[in-house]
Amino acid sequence: MLVFFFFISCHQNSKDTGIKEKESEQLDIDALKSSPDNFRLLFENDHVRVLEYTLKPGTKDQPHTLPPRSSYVVSGGKLKVFPENGHPTISDEKAGSATWRGYLGKHYVENIDNSEIKIILTEVKSSIKK
């Protein structure tokens, strides 16, 4: 399962992924649509969308973006994140950790560990109705 389980929690931790984008340049490449083998919809309403992210050892997902979200790591490991306009970074996801992250621009991820990574992501939907 995905290592990036986003779970809203009081413990808000921010990690610098090296991916910075101006708000006006934000893309919207839905991870659920671009990588259906890795992302599974668990719950959705007007406020949030909860996804389960799973990445097997040695595999990569497809390019996507992520909106602001919380995550909860069910089973951890090391991920290599490849941003579209930047240098790859290593993310050591620890089982049981919860974090908050803002928008993440176009990227893809590779599991460089020997175990499956699973994360629950809770994406926050915009409160502005169009």
Image (tube, rainbow, N blue to C red):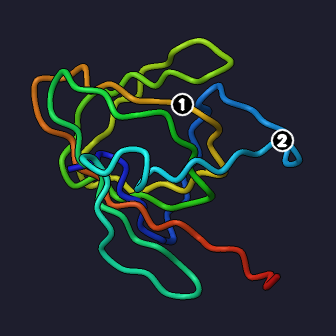
Residue 7 placement: quadrant: bottom left
Q: Is residue 9 left or right of residue 95?
A: right
Residue type beneath disc 2:
Glu
Q: Is residue 65 left or right of residue 118?
A: right
Image position of 69 with respect to 59: above or below: below
Mark 2: few/some/many CA within 10 Å (<14, 14-19, 20+) = few
Tell how many labels: 2
108 or 3, which lies in front? 108
Residue indicated by mark 1: 107
Q: Secondary structure at mark 1?
A: strand
Residue 111 in percent (x, y) is at 26, 27
Nearest to N terminus: mark 2 or mark 1: 2
Q: Is residue 36 left or right of residue 130?
A: left
1 or 14, which lies in front? 1
- Residue drawn where x is 35% and y is 57% of the image: 5
Residue 27 in percent (x, y) is at 71, 45
- Residue drawn where x is 61% and y is 56% of the image: 67
- Residue drawn where x is 48% and y is 54% of the image: 99
Mark 1: few/some/many CA within 10 Å (<14, 14-19, 20+) = many
Q: Quadrant of the C terminus?
A: bottom right
The residues bearing labels 2 and 1 have C-alpha atoms spaced at a distance of: 14 Å
Residue indicated by mark 2: 25
Residue type beneath disc 1:
His
